[in-house]
Structures are given as structure tokens and as C-alpha cells.
Image (spheres, helix red, strand yellow):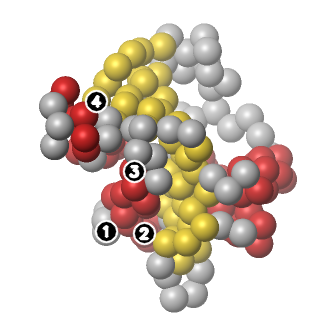
Amino acid sequence: MIERATLADAAACSAILHEWIYEHTWFPNHAPESASEQSMRSRIEEGAVYVSRNQTETDGFIAFSKGYLDCLYLTPEARNHGLGARLLEKAKAESPQGLSLWVLEKNKAAVRFYMREGFSETARGDGSDNEEGMPDIQMEWPPKEVENGKPA
């Protein structure tokens, strides 16, 4: 089930994010979990976060606002079962103007995922503009009405 997150979801979302960080040793972790939880609370208060729940717990989340996709993370057990695509469909449905995002170049699985989901690369950065200091890729998804420069 995908639904709008509440403040009670902040800790679970932060834990999912940090689980991903710990898994990917190349990613520089700059923030303690408590800071991530506070950041997640702020995003939730803005109404920009949706969570996915299985029968017992939160197994993923997506944060987006005003056409910008901030993050999408899943528990390891929830990956590769279509959940990321379902969360992304929610963001697409709520973003008629299209979506843009920045993804770290080194996160090859995410780059492949977004390409498969209809995003295209629009720019590259050298890392000087992100807090990780790592090269990144800007990707965009147009709304269906203007996909490929033609009405759908």
C-alpha cells in the first residue's frame, strides 16, 4: 500500500536511507541518523513524502516536490519486485509538469532504473555542487503529453 507519510514514518524512512548508505561503502555518510530523521520530518510536514507498507512495516519511500524527485529508497528485501516503479508512478501521477532529479554517477543501479522508467540524462556535474563531492547526473522525465516532443 502506498500512502502519504505521517510524522510517525520519519524514523522508518531514515532507517531505510541509512541502511542503503551502510550497504554502499562508496557513499560518504555525512549525517547521523538523528539528523536524517529530522530532515525526513521536515519533508513529511511539507507533504512531499509517500511510503510503501507491506503487512508489517514500511518497506520504501519516495520524496518529491514541485517537479523535483529528492529521493527514493527501499529496504533490501523490497528491491527488485516492482516497488520502486510503483512509488515512481505515484510521483509521476502527482507531477504533471514532469520530474527532474540528480543521481550520483557511481549509483549505476539507480541510473539504470531511472533510464528504464523513462528518464533521460540532461546534464552532468563534477561533484562541486553536491554535498557528497561526487560526479552526478541530472535526469528528467517529461509528462506523457509532451514525451518525445509530441503529444501522447
Q: Earlier in the sequence, mark 3 or mark 2?
A: 2
Nearer the observer, 121 or 21: 121
Q: Earlier in the sequence, mark 1 or mark 4?
A: 1
Distance from label 2 to label 1 (Cα)? Answer: 6 Å
Residue flagged by tag 4: what amino acid is it?
Ser
Q: Which residue is mark 1?
A: 81
Label 2 CA crowd tier, 10 Å (few <14, some 14–19, many 20+): some
Quadrant for residue 10, please give it. bottom right
* Residue hosting label 4: 120
- Would you place residue 125 above or below residue 85 in this image? above
Question: At 56% from the left edge and 39% from the top edge, which residue is drawn?
Answer: 66
Q: Earlier in the sequence, mark 4 or mark 2?
A: 2
With respect to residue 116, does 75 lie above or below? below
Report, in whole angstroms, how far the alpha carbon at label 4 lies from the one at label 2.
25 Å
Residue placed at 53% from the left, 37% from the top?
A: 68
CA–CA distance between discs 3 and 2?
20 Å
Mark 2 touching mark 1, by CB under 8 A? yes
- Asked if residue 37 can be seen in this view, the reply is no
Q: Which residue is more in the foreground, 125 or 149?
A: 149
Relative to 9, residue 84 above or below: above
**Tag count:** 4
Q: Say if mark 1 contacts mark 3, CB within 8 Å.
A: no
Q: Where residue 51 sits: x, y (%)? A: 56, 67
Cα–Cα span, label 1 and label 4: 23 Å
**Residue 104 % position (x, y):** 47, 29
Quadrant of the drawing holding the C terminus? top left
Q: Nearer the viewer, mark 3 or mark 2?
A: 3
Q: Amino acid at mark 2?
A: Ala
Q: CA distance from mark 3 to mark 4?
A: 14 Å
Q: Which residue is mark 3?
A: 92
Q: Earlier in the sequence, mark 1 or mark 3?
A: 1
User: Which element is circle 2 on?
Assistant: helix
